[in-house]
Image: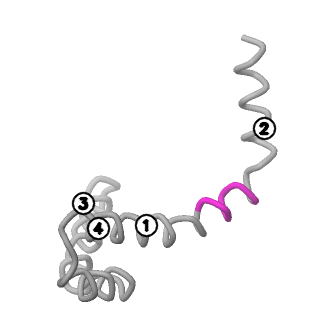
Amino acid sequence: MSRMGTLVLITFLLFASDFAFGQGCSQCKLLAEQGAELEEASFGSNINTGILYLMLAPYIILFIVFHRRIIAFFKAMKKG
């Protein structure tokens, strides 16, 4: 199988698995259920806070792994 065929197959499998298993996280479900009796503005705020909370861990891990490159990049940007 060619590289392009393999790439298309992997992309298709990733999208298919997303539709099959993408049912939402428990944090979002909990906030959605709690937000049913709240006003609309506070519901969106709760969902956004939950998403930010869940996305914090990957960014911390990426910073720990690549902190030298990130610092070098910003130093190079400062010079140039």
Residue 71, which numbered label? 2
Magenta segment, prevailing SS (helix, strand or loop): helix
Q: Nearer the viewer, mark 4 or mark 3?
A: 4
Give the distance between the C-alpha atoms of the residues marked 4 and 2, in whole angstroms.
Answer: 37 Å
Q: Nearer the viewer, mark 3 or mark 1?
A: 1
The kind of residue on which mark 1 rests is: Thr
Magenta-drawn segment: 59-64
Query: Residue 19: which quarter of the image?
Result: bottom left
Residue, disc 1: 49
Q: Which residue is mark 3?
A: 8
Query: Where does residue 64 sit, x and y in percent of width and height?
Result: 76, 59
**Residue at left 57%, top 65%?**
56
Crowding near pointer 3: few (<14 within 10 Å), some, many (20+)?
A: few
C-alpha distance separating marks 4 and 1: 10 Å
> What is the number of the mark on residue 73?
none
Q: Earlier in the sequence, mark 2 or mark 3?
A: 3
Locate residue 1: give its quadrant.
Answer: bottom left
Task: Point out the frontmost of discs 2 and 1.
Answer: 1
**How far apart are the two marked residues, 3 and 1, measured between alpha carbons?**
35 Å
Q: Specify which label sits upstream in the sequence, 2 or 1.
A: 1
Residue ID for mark 4 = 42
Question: Callout 1: helix, strand or loop?
Answer: helix
Dot 3 amino acid type: Val
Local crowd at mark 2 within 10 Å, few (<14), some, or many (≥20)?
A: few
- Residue at 77% across, 49% down: 67
Q: Secondary structure at mark 3?
A: helix
Front residue of this view, candidates 15 and 61: 61
Q: x%, y% of residue 4? A: 29, 53
